[in-house]
Amino acid sequence: MSLPPGPESHPVVLMWRWIRTPFELMNECHERFGDTFFLALPFTDKLGLVTISDPKAIKDVFGFGPDEAHAGEANIVLKPFLGKHSLLLLDGASHLRHRKMILPAFHGERMLAYGRTMMDVAMNAIDSFPMQRKFPVHGPMQSITLKIIIRTVFGIDDGPRFAELADVLARGLDASAWPGLLFPFMQRDLGPLSPWGRWLRLHNRASKLLRDEISRARASKDAKRTDVLSMLLQTEMTDDEIHDELVTLLVAGHETTATSLAWALRWILPNKKLLGELREEILGAGDDPAKIAKLELLDDTVKETLRLQPVIPMVGRVLQEPKTIAGYDLRAGSVVAPSIYLVHQNPELYPNPTAFEPRRFRNFKPAAWEFLPFGGGLRKCVGAAFAIYEMKMVLATLLPRVEMHLANEDVKVARRSITLTPSHGLPVVVTSRLSPAAARARRRQHTAEAAIH
C-alpha cells in the first residue's frame, strides 16, 4: 500500500483542529500536499483517512459499486443517534433496498405538493422574530425546518401532538449538537445532567412519540394522506426500520437545511443589490410554489450557498477491496474521503472561489463530481431535491416580507455535531416586517402590474 503525504501532527491535535477549524486545516493541507493527502485522525485506525479533491478521482470513487466501497461503514459514528436501520448506515443490498423505497417520497408531484406547507410554516414563523434587537437567526430556521418535517413527513397538523413532538425533537436535536458526543468515550450515562444522559432521555422520549405516530398511522389506513410516513407504511419496511429512517430524515433533513438557510442569509443580507433583485424576482412569481421553484436567480443563490458554505465538509467511503485512487494503491479497509469543501474552492472550476457570486452558475453547469453538497454516486442524499426546494420556498417567503441586517459581518464557522454553522447562530436585527395580509397584497399588486406591462 502507498499512502499520500500528510501532516505529522499528533492524531489528537489533528482531531482538535478538525473539530475547531476544519476549513483552515483542509486549506493548509491542500496547499502543502496537493489534491490528495493523508489525515491520521483518531478512530480511523492505521489505514487513516485519504482525502481527495481532484474531480477525476472523485468521479472514480462515486462510480464504485455497492460492494466496492461502503459509505455506511464510514458513517458508523452516527449509529447511536440514527439507529442501525438508517439509510446513512446501511451498505450493499440493504442500502439499495431502503433507498428504492424512500426515494419516491422526495421527487415528482409528491414533493411539489409540499410547497404550500413550506411557505405557510415560514410565513407563520416570521411573526415570532423579535424586532429591533439582535437574535441568532439559526434558531428560527431550525424551528421552520423542523415544523416542515413534522408536517410533510409525519402528516401532523397544529395541535397538542404537533406541539409535543416539536418540543421534544427540538430539545433532543439540540442536546446532540455538542461534537464531543460523537466520541464513544463520551457516550456514558452519568445521570440526567450529564451530556449523554440528557440526550439519551430526550432520545428515548422522542423515540416513543415516533413509534406512537407509526402505530397511529398504520391503524388509520387513511388513503388521503400524502405524507412520507404514510408512503413508507406501504413498503415492506418493518416498524423498526421506519422508525430509524424517520429519525434520519429528522436529523439530516432538519439540521442541514436550517444551517444552509442561515448561511444563505449570511451572504444575501449584506448584498443589497442581490437582495433587491431577489425580491423583485420572487414578487414576480406571486405565491405560486411551482413558479418560485423555477426562479433562476433564486436557484443560483441556493446553489452558490451550498457551494461556498457546505454544511458537511466531506463524505467517506471504506474500500472493500484494493483500489488505485489518484495514483495511490490503497488496500481494503482504507477510508477515502472526497472533500466537498476543497472541490468547491477549486479556482479552475469556480473562479474567485471565496466570493459569493450566484450568477457563476448561468454559464457553468458542473458535473456531479464537481458540485457535491449532497455527496454523489449511489450514496447521494435522497433528500437533495427536497432540501433545495425547501430553501427556495422559505427564502421566497422571508425575503420580501422582512427587512433585516447582520448584527456583525465578521461571521466565523462553528460546529454543531457533524455540521458547520455560522458562529453564534448568525445574529441579525429585524427592523421592519409586513403582516401576512400585507405581504400577500404586495405580491398580488406586483403580479397585476407585471401583467399590465
Image (cartoon, grey):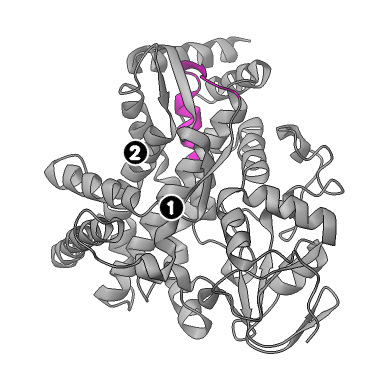
Q: Residue at x 71, y 59 (%)?
A: 368
Question: Rounded to the nearest whole Å, what is the CA distance between mark 2 and mark 1?
Answer: 12 Å
Residue 418, placed above or below residue 189: above
- Direction from residue 57 to residue 401 in the image, left or right: left
Say what secondary structure mark 2 lies in.
Answer: helix
Q: Residue at x 58, y 75 (%)?
A: 44
| Earlier sequence position, callout 2 versus callout 1 | 2
The quarter of the picture where residue 5 lies is: bottom right
The residue stretch that appears in magenta:
391-409
Which quadrant is the C terminus positioned in?
Answer: top right
| Residue 282 visible in rendering | yes
Of helix, strand and loop, which one carries label 1?
A: helix
Where 105 falls versus 410 (above or below)?
below
In the displayed structure, does residue 401 sit left or right of residue 359? left
Specify whether residue 98 is painted magenta: no
Residue that mark 1 sits on: 253
179, above or below 171, in the image:
below
Q: Which mark is residue 327?
A: none
Give percent across and percent down for residue 345: 76, 47
The quarter of the picture where the N terminus appears is bottom right
Q: What residue is drawn where x is 61% and y is 54%? A: 17
In the rendered view, tell whether residue 167 sits above or below residue 376: above
**Pointer 2 residue:** 143
The amino acid at mark 2 is: Ser
Few, some or many C-alpha atoms within 10 Å of disc 2 (few <14, some 14-19, many ≥20)? many
The residue under label 1 is which amino acid type? Gly
Question: Relative to the observer, which residue lies in front, 249 or 221?
Answer: 249
Image position of 358 (left or right of 398): right
